[in-house]
Image (cartoon, rainbow, N blue to C red):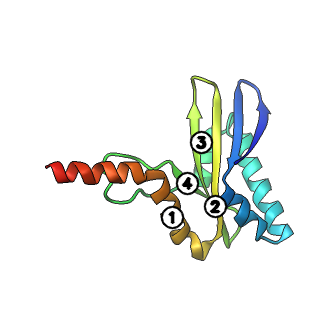
C-alpha cells in the first residue's frame, strides 16, 4: 500500500492506495492517470478547509442489504465521464488526521462489479457476524 501525506495546517491528510488501485492506475492512459491523481489530490487538499464541498463531490455507496444498522464508508469520486475512484474517507479527530484510502479506479461501466468486490472484502466480518446472529435467532 502506497502512502502520501499532504501538509495542511492542524490536520494531516494521508492518501493510501491499495495494490488493486495501483494496478488499475497502471492500466490507464497517461492523460487518465494525470487526471485521476489531480482529482484525488484536489479533494484531499480541500478537505481540511472545505470538507462539505468535498463530500458533495463524493457519492456514498450503499452497503449490502444484510448489514443492517451500519452506514457505508465507501464512496465514489467522479474523475471524468467514464472513470470513477472507489475510496474511503476516515476522519480521525483524536490524531488530527484524515485518511483517504483508494481501492479501485474503474470505468463507469465496471463500477458495480468493482464495488461489490471491495465491499465484500471490507465488510465480510460484518456479513459473517450478521449471518451468525440470524442463525441464533
Marker disc for residue 62:
none
Could you tell me if the residues under marks 1 and 2 are in contact, i.e. CB atoms within 8 Å?
A: yes
- Residue 134: percent from the left, percent from the top? 20, 52
Element under disc 1: helix
On the picture, is 91 further left or further right than 49? Answer: left
Q: Which mark is residue 52?
A: 3
Q: Which x, y percent locates residue 47?
A: 67, 39
Is residue 51 or residue 20 the one in the foreground? 20
Task: Rate crowding at label 4 as few (under 14), some (14 to 19) or many (20 or more) other CA atoms within 10 Å.
Answer: many
- Between the C-alphas of marks 1 and 4, the distance is 14 Å
In contact (CB < 8 Å): disc 1 and disc 4: no
Question: Disc 2 designates what residue?
Answer: 104
The residue lying at 37 percent from left, 46 percent from top is 70
Query: Is the residue 112 above or below the residue 18 in the image?
Result: below
Residue 39's quadrant in the figure?
Answer: bottom right
The residue under the point 51% across, 70% down is 112
Dot 2 or dot 3: first in sequence order is: 3
Query: How many C-alpha atoms fall within 10 Å of the one at disc 2: few (<14), some, or many (≥20)?
Result: many
Left or right: residue 55 versus residue 29 is left
Q: Position of residue 45 (x, y in %)?
A: 75, 41
Q: Which is nearer the N-term, disc 1 or disc 2?
A: 2
Q: Which residue is mark 4?
A: 75
The residue singled out by tag 1 in the image is: 117
- Report the Cα–Cα distance between label 2 and label 4: 11 Å
**Which numbered mark, 4 or 3, is in the foreground of this view?**
4
Dot 3: few (<14), some (14–19), or many (≥20) neighbours within 10 Å?
few
Look at the image and tell me whether residue 61 can be seen.
Answer: no
Q: Nearer the viewer, mark 1 or mark 4?
A: 1
Query: Which of the two discs, 4 and 3, labels the residue nearer the N terminus?
Result: 3
Front residue of this view, candidates 113 and 136 = 136
Marks 3 and 1, how far apart at CA: 28 Å
Q: Are marks 3 and 1 in contact (CB under 8 Å)?
A: no
Amino acid at each position: 500500500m502506497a502512502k502520501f501525506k499532504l501538509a495542511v495546517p492542524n490536520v494531516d491528510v494521508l492518501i493510501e492506495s491499495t495494490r488493486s488501485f495501483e494496478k488499475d492506475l497502471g492500466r490507464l492512459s497517461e492523460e487518465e492517470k494525470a487526471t485521476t491523481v489531480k482529482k484525488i489530490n484536489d479533494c484531499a487538499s480541500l478537505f481540511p478547509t472545505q470538507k462539505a464541498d468535498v463530500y458533495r463531490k463524493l457519492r456514498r455507496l450503499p452497503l449490502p442489504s444484510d448489514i443492517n444498522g451500519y452506514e457505508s464508508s465507501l464512496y465514489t469520486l467522479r474523475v471524468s465521464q467514464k472513470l470513477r475512484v472507489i475510496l474511503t474517507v476516515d476522519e480521525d479527530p483524536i490524531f488530527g488526521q484524515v485518511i483517504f484510502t483508494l481501492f479501485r479506479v474503474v470505468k463507469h461501466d465496471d463500477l458495480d462489479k468493482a464495488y461489490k468486490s471491495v465491499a465484500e472484502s471490507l465488510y465480510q466480518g460484518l456479513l459473517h457476524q450478521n449471518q451468525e446472529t440470524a442463525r441464533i435467532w
